Image: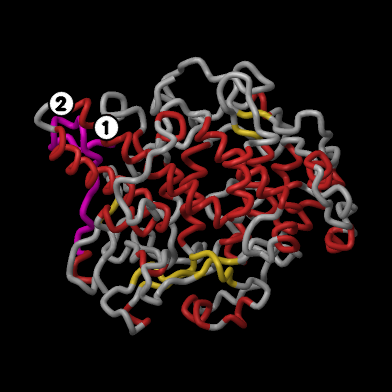
């Protein structure tokens, strides 16, 4: 199946254990961690409730103070090894791999009967959609008849609220402010929205170079395809060489790349294991800060002139320009200065939160949830582990033949009877805290995340690992390519 055709009704690739789905199980013989009973549901809701054991108890009264005073997030410490942007890069990568709009928290689910509306590959189909011919709304019709260039739009009035006086840009939107993008989830918050924009502009910057190199001798379709290849390969490179080592540790990332995968295998084409999508890869929820400096506004030194806000605040007024960092809006100040999120060496970067079982308090009252639906992200994740019939973390650790966390390390869920049969998501977070000091994932979570990401790229017939494993990036420095290089080439790093 060609990349970018996820929604054309084509035959769904097979997984190891199912002939028609894109979700499956890495450990299909392991039993669920618990039966789906009212008492188990009540226990999970208790663990994930606002003010419960997973709520970090952040003081949300002053978003600026949350950035400056660690005491206001005493139970939610910063990660000294990962910057704030990795949280949203992880979210962007997730949206590139999986999209399941159909599953429910209210009933038990068979993952092998759920369709993944994303192609299980790191191929940027969330950016490119079906390509210029299938998804024309994503492409600039004023350039090359809409056949080459991603559509972006200037934010009116933004130049007046930036330090350098230069305009900032936004995703293309329709008249109702709905983003015209390959995956609507990439407009969930301002940061991931602007990260998506960066990939659009990176494509356009690479396109300029490709046109200069081969434009006179190749068709527009060939120019687009070559640009798309270059963008995808650079993205895959930074995922494998920057994001993954930071997330699972350089030693484990190197072991998987060098010695191969032990548990993630498939018969025909790669699939997404629910142990990954519903549990291990949701480690990023623990990394979310309660508040961020979105941009420096008109001053690099005066916070009152900067845009600092909670990531989500249901009480934020003014829907067109709310006081939080929700997505779905366009206003002059709603842009990102990336110096806060990735390390450009200027001392302005901020950290994300440690990977542990404490989540920022802003995540316990999500917006847009239906009546009667849990609005705590922690509760939703725990119930998803139940409805998807995931095994316990202990069972997966034994299957991997790695040390199992003792019940004493999980004593805070003993009252619910889950200290020896712990939901995999909770176990992965606690393991990261105990085994990785909260800086990275532990052996169970790290192995699942590392093998799936490595495997998806290895199983992609158009990836650089398959096409040209000796390839090195054209952009960046010293044969390497990082997010700061992508953002710089994309032209989205404003001068401060």
> Residue 247, percent across and down?
58, 55
CB-based contact (under 8 Å), mark 2 and mark 1: yes
Residue drawn 41% across and 71% down? 293
> Residue 230, percent across and down?
31, 38
Q: Does the magenta segment cover residue 153? A: yes
Q: Which residues are magenta?
A: 137-157
> Residue 89, percent across and down?
46, 53
- Viewer-proximal residue among 484 and 331: 484
- Viewer-proximal residue among 207 and 68: 207
Report the colour scheme: secondary structure
**On screen, residue 60 above or below 462:** below
Question: Residue tagged by mark 2?
Answer: 218
- Which quadrant of the structure image shows residue 70? bottom right
- Which quadrant of the structure image shows residue 376? bottom right
Horizontally, is 177 left or right of 261 in the view? left
Mark found first going from the N terminus, 2 or 1: 2
- Please rate how many residues cluster around mark 1, counting C-alpha atoms within 10 Å: few if below 14, some from 14 to 19, many from 20: some
Q: Main secondary structure of the magenta part?
A: loop
Q: Secondary structure at mark 1?
A: helix
Q: Is residue 266 visible?
A: yes
> Residue 369, percent across and down?
57, 49
**On screen, residue 457 above or below 83:** above
Question: Residue tagged by mark 1?
Answer: 226
Horizontally, is 403 left or right of 7 in the view? right
In the picture, the quarter occupied by the N terminus is: top left
């Amino acid at each position: 199946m060609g990349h970018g055709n996820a929604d054309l009704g084509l035959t769904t690739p097979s997984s190891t254990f199912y002939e028609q789905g894109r979700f499956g199980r890495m450990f299909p013989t392991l039993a669920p961690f618990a039966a789906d009973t009212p008492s188990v549901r009540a226990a999970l809701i208790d663990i994930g409730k606002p003010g419960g054991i997973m709520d970090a108890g952040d003081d949300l009264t002053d978003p600026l103070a949350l950035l400056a005073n660690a005491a206001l997030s005493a139970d939610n410490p910063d990660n000294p090894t990962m910057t704030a942007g990795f949280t949203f890069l992880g979210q962007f990568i997730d949206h590139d791999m999986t999209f399941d709009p159909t599953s429910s928290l209210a009933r038990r689910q068979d993952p092998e009967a759920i369709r993944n509306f994303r192609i299980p590959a790191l191929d940027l189909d969330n950016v490119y959609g079906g390509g210029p011919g299938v998804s024309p709304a994503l492409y600039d019709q004023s350039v090359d008849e809409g056949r080459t260039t991603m559509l972006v739009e200037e934010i009116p009035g933004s130049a007046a609220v930036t330090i350098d006086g230069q305009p900032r840009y936004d995703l293309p939107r329709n008249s109702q402010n709905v983003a015209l993008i390959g995956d609507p989830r990439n407009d969930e918050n301002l940061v991931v929205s602007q990260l998506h924009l960066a990939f659009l502009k990176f494509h356009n910057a690479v396109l300029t170079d490709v046109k200069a190199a081969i434009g006179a001798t190749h068709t527009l379709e060939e120019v687009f395809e070559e640009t798309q290849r270059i963008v995808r390969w650079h993205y895959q490179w930074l995922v494998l060489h920057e994001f993954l080592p930071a997330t699972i540790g350089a030693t484990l990332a190197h072991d998987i790349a060098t010695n191969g995968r032990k548990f993630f295998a498939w018969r025909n084409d790669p699939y997404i294991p629910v142990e990954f999508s519903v549990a291990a890869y949701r480690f990023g929820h623990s990394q979310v800060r309660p508040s961020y400096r979105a941009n420096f506004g008109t001053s690099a030194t005066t916070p009152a002139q900067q845009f600092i806000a909670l990531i989500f605040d249901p009480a934020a007024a003014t829907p067109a320009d709310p006081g939080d960092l929700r997505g779905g809006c366009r206003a002059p100040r709603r842009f990102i200065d990336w110096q806060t999120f990735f390390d450009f060496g200027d001392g302005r970067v901020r950290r994300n939160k440690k990977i542990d079982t404490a989540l920022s308090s802003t995540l316990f009252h999500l917006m847009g949830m239906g009546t009667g639906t849990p609005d705590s992200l922690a509760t939703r994740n725990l119930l998803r582990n139940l409805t998807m019939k995931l095994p316990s973390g202990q069972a997966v650790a034994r299957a991997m033949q790695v040390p199992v966390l003792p019940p004493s390390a999980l004593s805070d869920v003993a009252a619910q009877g889950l200290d020896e049969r712990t939901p995999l998501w909770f176990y992965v977070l606690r393991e990261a805290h105990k085994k990785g000091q909260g800086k990275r994932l532990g052996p169970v979570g790290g192995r699942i995340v590392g093998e799936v990401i490595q495997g998806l790229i290895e199983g992609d017939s158009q990836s650089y690992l398959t096409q040209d494993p000796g390839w090195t990036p054209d952009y960046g420095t010293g044969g390497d390519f990082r997010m700061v290089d992508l953002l710089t080439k994309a032209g989205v790093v404003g001068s401060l």
